[in-house]
């Protein structure tokens, strides 16, 4: 999983590419840790090149969403591949995280 984080003003853009699974979930958590320390975060995850997520990856997204909610921020995931979106739909994560 490759994670690229850029900021424009108060908005944070995160570009994800590759696979998010048990082999790299801990690194992903370290990569997004600074995002979970911001007050009122405004985060947009671009999933154009994200190929796969395991249950560990879903767990990381849930942790991020809960943290953003607790800090009265916004989180949106966009450009999700159909097979990844299907995982979010089947598990009910599409009801938890705003996906456009």
Image (cartoon, grey):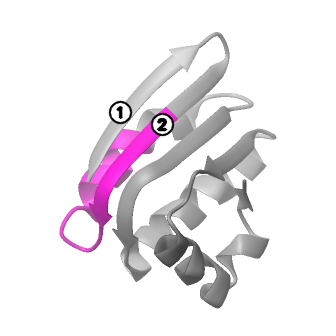
Instruction: Give the labeled residue for mark 1.
Output: 4
Separation of marks 2 and 1 at Cα, in angstroms: 6 Å
Which one is in front, 45 or 33? 45
Q: Specify the quadrant that holds the N terminus.
A: bottom left
Q: Residue furthest bottom?
A: 90
Instruction: Give the labeled residue for mark 2.
Output: 14
Q: Residue furthest top?
A: 9
Residue at image position (69%, 46%) is: 75
Horizontal and vertical percent position of residue 34: 45, 33
Circle 1 crowding by C-alpha within 10 Å: few under 14, some 14–19, many from 20: some
- 82 versus 1 height, above or below: below
Residue at image position (42%, 81%) is: 55
In contact (CB < 8 Å): disc 2 and disc 1: yes
Q: What span is colored magenta in the figure?
A: 14-32
- 19 versus 91 height, above or below: above
**Badge 2 element:** strand
Q: Is residue 47 left or right of residue 18?
A: right
């Amino acid at each position: 999983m490759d994670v690229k984080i850029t900021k424009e003003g108060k908005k944070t853009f995160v570009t994800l590419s590759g696979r998010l699974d048990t082999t790299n979930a801990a690194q992903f958590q370290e990569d997004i840790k600074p995002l979970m320390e911001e007050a009122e975060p405004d985060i947009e995850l671009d999933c154009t090149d994200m190929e796969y997520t395991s249950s560990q990856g879903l767990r990381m997204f849930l942790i991020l969403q809960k943290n953003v909610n607790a800090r009265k921020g916004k989180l949106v995931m966009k450009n999700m591949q159909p097979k990844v979106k299907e995982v979010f739909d089947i598990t009910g994560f599409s009801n938890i995280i705003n996906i456009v």
